[in-house]
Amino acid sequence: MKYYISILLLFALKMAVSQPVWNVVDYTGSTTAYFVLTIDGEAAEENDLLGAFVDDECRGIGEVVINDGAAYVAMQIGGNTSEVVNFRVWDESVSVELFVTTAITSNPGGIVGNPPDYITIDVSSSNTTPVTVIPGWDVVSYTNSTTAYCVVTVNGEPAEEADKIGAFVDGECRAIGKIIMNEGIAYSTLEIQGVDVEEVNFRIWDTSAGEELYVAFSASSVPGGIIGLPPGYLALDGIPVPQLSIAEIQGNADTSPYEGQLVEVAGIVTAIDINGYYLQDANAEWSGIYVYSPDRAETISISDRVVLSGTVIESLEKTQIEDVISIEVATNDLEIVPLEAEELTEAYESVLVTVTGRADDFSSGSGDWVITSESNVSFDISLYMYGDYTSYANYQYQVTGVVFSVEALYMVEPRTEADIVNLSEQNGVKIYGQDFKIYPNPFNEYITIESIGGNEVDGIVISSLDGKTVKSLQVRSSQIETSNLAPGEYIISLMKGEKVIVSGSILKVE
């Protein structure tokens, strides 16, 4: 920790140096960013500069600080919304501006490259002219590949020579191709990385518009072989990223019809965990989806309205969005109200719900537990987001949370203390199944059992927490004498014949 603090202090103490004509435009918001900078693989020098740009507008300038032979840069990147940020390096030794092939997405109000996970930028001294940088298009190499020959159009018209074509498998970039014009037709050849036969999706980067376009067509790879062999070229037509409702993405089915595709979606944040967040765009079934985005989880708040573009993925039979390439927090225009679910199905995946039932068993800590409704439907309760909680057998609970799913197992994940309501205990009085009151609790010499609405029991069993019976009697009075019990916690069960009607905890004090 002292090491990182010393680097940050050096950033603050660094004196200004000469720089190119980069005029920073100020915004009310900014992203804090930390980098390690190299030129041709060697650490940048002390008077070099790193500039951040959105289009051609300079949003921030960072000075190089040398520490233990490494060149560090810290800067504030101006901007109020999430945007694609490109970079340039000023090489002071030769007074040359270099163009970087790395781009990031800004995170207004947050941090990117948080030490020790610095953003690494290496620029070639030969990159003295502007380059097209596409965020998220970082090709992953494999030991085999598929050659693909394509004809590329944008909205039905030939793509332009500066455009790019990308091949993706589950959001992972496997190839980038250039456009070659011939007799008014735009051709591209791709070497699609991969050793297995996989479904390949495509995207087009429209350089003139500075945006990524969606391609509806997909193809299966043939490692070591060819697809689109001329004259049977793959026909790839780019259109704007489709703006879809969550129900359209979910497809009212187990698997999304948009799996592997880039989509734009908007919704209200209903829950946040360490790896991402849940979105919902309607108070209806099929209206929830999980966004896997660990780097954004800390900067999003519940009730934010988020507009984002990302890739639809099926993970362990759960539809979610990954590889978010753009995100914007907008004004909330919808109040999400939990749906009262009588049974959890695929339609409730990632939807905010409320369920009610009696706890099957005593449970303490952060482990999962189960409640069963009056219609004998069981609901699994996960405390992954909530943390520790103690539930008591046969107590009635109302639980609100998002529906987490994995391999067709559906669980309700409460988020905060307000999401778990113990219906069997109100204002300090335990209302067992809303049929009986047992008081005082804690107790000393006696306890009183009060029937609500004429309900009756004919037996009482008081047990230790390990299940041993310490007192058993027939009900002859509403007041039970307990002076012979040692101080401690017990479980009381009210019986009707051999059947336990309700049970719960009671505490004997001195």
Image (cartoon, helix red, strand yellow):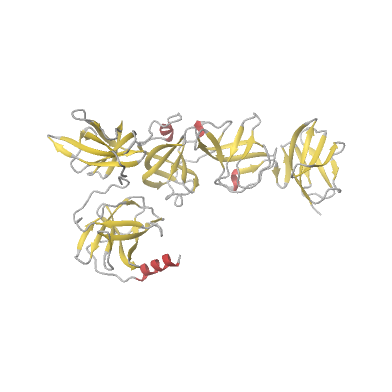
In depth, the one of 166 and 209 nearer the eye is 166
Query: How many numbered callouts?
Result: 0
Question: Residue 137, image x and y in percent?
Answer: 30, 45
Question: Residue 135, image x and y in percent?
Answer: 31, 47
Residue 199 occupies quadrant:
top left
Residue 75 occupies quadrant:
bottom left
Residue 401 occupies quadrant:
top right
The structure residue drawn at horizontal position 64% and vertical position 29%, both measured from the top left corner, is 376
The vertical placement of 122 against 397, above or below, is below
In depth, the one of 389 and 281 nearer the eye is 389
The vertical placement of 218 against 22, above or below, is above
In depth, the one of 68 and 16 nearer the eye is 68
Query: Given the current orientation, which residue lies at the most extreme left position?
Result: 183
Give the left or right position of residue 102, taking residue 285 as reference: left
In depth, the one of 313 and 194 nearer the eye is 194
Query: Given the current orientation, which residue lies at the most extreme right position?
Result: 476
Give the left or right position of residue 203, taking residue 444 as reference: left
Question: Residue 403, image x and y in percent?
Answer: 53, 38
Give the left or right position of residue 442, taking residue 149 as reference: right
Locate the C terminus by quadrant: bottom right
The structure residue drawn at horizontal position 79% and vertical position 34%, both measured from the top left corner, is 495
The vertical placement of 268 against 375, above or below, is below
Locate the N terminus by quadrant: bottom left
Give the left or right position of residue 416, taking residue 201 as reference: right
Question: Residue 445, image x and y in percent?
Answer: 85, 49
